[in-house]
Image: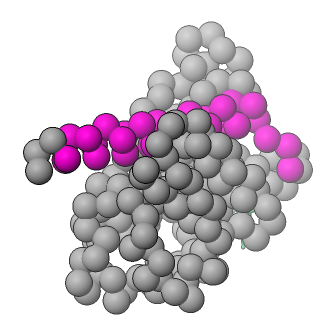
Amino acid sequence: MKKIAVIFHSGQGNTAHFAEGVAKGARSVPDVDVELVRAETISTDPDLLLAFDAFVLGSPTYLGGVSGIFKTFLDSTGGLWRNQKLKGKLACGFTVSALPSGDKQSTLNAMFTFAMQHGMVWVGNPFLPEQQRGVPYEHALNRLGSWSGFMAQAGHSNGGNSYAPGDERTAFAFGQNFANVLLRMSAQVEEVL
Ligand SMILES: Cc1cc2nc3c(=O)[nH]c(=O)nc-3n(C[C@H](O)[C@H](O)[C@H](O)COP(=O)(O)O)c2cc1C
């Protein structure tokens, strides 16, 4: 059984909503155990990360970066970084913001850099935007066209807390793909050993 932690912060509930969607997708893969973990909880005891094989990082985009609470979580892992205790684990990231762009890429870049500093292996979002194949934009998988991680749009500039069906579908597919990659890579590593 491989263990994934979906670690997220959510001020107003939107990132929490998509964290659940990503977790649901990952749980659809057999032999994978998925736990939803609040960033503010795990910051107080980052050694708990050692029990997991892989991490989904989820933060709202606040002022073009991760939220303060999510950054506190990232910084709480400094002790683990010094001894590279998280090296070789898998990571991926997603972010939610109100505007179509809203500088979400900066948030994903911060997560990617964090994972690289820890020697983790980054997994992206390998889905072609379906609107290019005729699926209506609101319903299209990866409609925001982000490959380095999953981006979703929600918040006051998006007409309240309604979610695009395409973003809901992408959350599920993103989690499912991550869990599948984890199983595939684990099998290969075990074969080599
Ligand atoms: C302090 C603050 C800063 C924000 N900065 C941005 C931003 O840079 N870009 C953007 O598109 N939305 C921004 N937003 C909107 C949030 O990203 C959006 O409402 C998101 O869905 C919030 O997620 P949450 O409900 O998980 O907190 C900001 C919201 C807050 C409260």
Left or right side of 25 for 90:
left
Q: Say whether residue 52 is visible.
A: yes
Count how many numbered circles sit on residues in the image: 0
**Chain part drawn in magenta:** 161-190
The residue depicted at 85 percent of the width and 43 percent of the height is 162
Q: Say whether residue 72 is visible.
A: no
Of 114 and 88, the residue lying toward us: 88
Q: Main secondary structure of the magenta part?
A: helix
Left or right side of 85 for 137:
right
Q: Is residue 179 magenta?
A: yes
Of 182 and 18, the residue lying toward us: 182
The residue depicted at 67 percent of the width and 37 percent of the height is 167
Q: Position of residue 79 (x, y in %)?
A: 34, 89
Task: From this view, report whether residue 15 is shown above or below residue 26.
Answer: below
- The quadrant of the picture showing ligand 1 is bottom right
Q: Position of residue 47 (x, y in %)?
A: 43, 82
Left or right side of 183 for 159:
right
Task: From this view, report whether residue 82 is shown above or below residue 116.
Answer: below
